[in-house]
Amino acid sequence: VMQLRAVAVVVHFEPQGVSNFLRALANLGITPVPELLMAMKARAVDVAPKFDPEGIANLMWSLAMLDVDPGEALVEAVKASAIARASKYKHQEATNFLWAMGTMGLEVGPELGALMEKRALATANTFISKEMTGAITQCQTVPELKAFCIQHAPNFGQIQVTASWGVLAKMKVDPSSLSRSAEAPEVLEVVQILTEMLVAFGPDLTARNTANTIHSIARLHTSRRAKSNPGVMAALKQRAEATVEEMFPQHLASLAWSFATLDETVSTELADGIRLRAVATEDLLGTLEISNLMWGFATLQLSV
């Protein structure tokens, strides 16, 4: 029923609608009825110039998974659109497009082939970065996180460092309370590794990564009034002061809560910056952000 209805209204499908509909069928393992295939392929040809890289990659991937012959008209239209937008392709989009074309036994052509391979190589580091961050979040134990950090340290960026602090915080291991723990040496080693990385990236940390890292360190030190590395915290507070105008309410609330939890002194400049930014983004403040901001300022004995 849905397929036949799609045929009836196919002229109203935009590029994303065409690729999403076919991708849904491919994911569900549903074979399209002939009328739908004919209508969707014709519509894809009509709107081909409007397809973005993700849409083209999803369209061709779906046809390949459905074992459908796209037809010469659609192939040529897609290739022309892909060439026009080659510089916009992300790594996964480029590789999915090339895989689909190869799976269907279609010639990419020397020009498009060269452009896609170049784009895939140019964006490989971004793809690897995302894959690495995902792998970090999957670490379940301190030894596992330690091994990953040591193995991949040369490829870490500030996002991976921030993510590692977050994972360590979720493990609820407080470095200041580990004297009786068998895992104390490994926890402290991970903290040392991440601290060294943090120092290296410190001057370039984004507002988000600054706030998230400070928050993770506060969560890590679960003992009331436990102190973090003073040198690192001083650098992070300096970076927070420099980037506070770029922060959103959740970041501001995280800063206030974290500094209060760690009993960290906050400079007048940083406190003023948090206040002013909170006022500027007041329409985005939720109840949790308001509560954490008020609690943090009250605990630190700062006026609001």
Image (tube, helix red, strand yellow):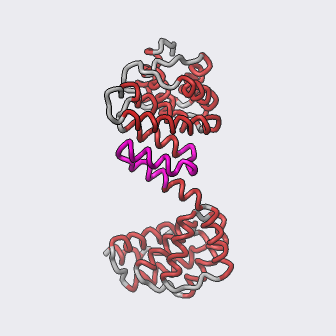
* Depth check, front residue: 86 or 169: 169
Residue at the image position 49 percent from the left and 73 percent from the top: 59
Q: Quadrant of residue 198?
A: top right
* Depth check, front residue: 199 or 209: 199
Q: Position of residue 31 (x, y in %)?
A: 35, 80
The segment highlighted magenta reads: 132-159
Residue at the image position 57 percent from the left and 46 percent from the top: 157
Q: Position of residue 267 (x, y in %)?
A: 59, 17
Q: Position of residue 53 (x, y in %)?
A: 57, 67
Residue 153 magenta-highlighted = yes
Residue 259 magenta-highlighted = no
Residue 283 seen in this snapshot: no
**Quarter of the N terminus within the rendering:** bottom left
Residue at the image position 55 percent from the left and 75 percent from the top: 98
Residue at the image position 40 percent from the left and 74 percent from the top: 6
* Depth check, front residue: 255 or 168: 168
- 35 in relation to 141, above or below: below
* Depth check, front residue: 221 or 279: 221
Q: Main secondary structure of the magenta part?
A: helix
Residue 185 seen in this snapshot: yes
- 16 in relation to 138, above or below: below
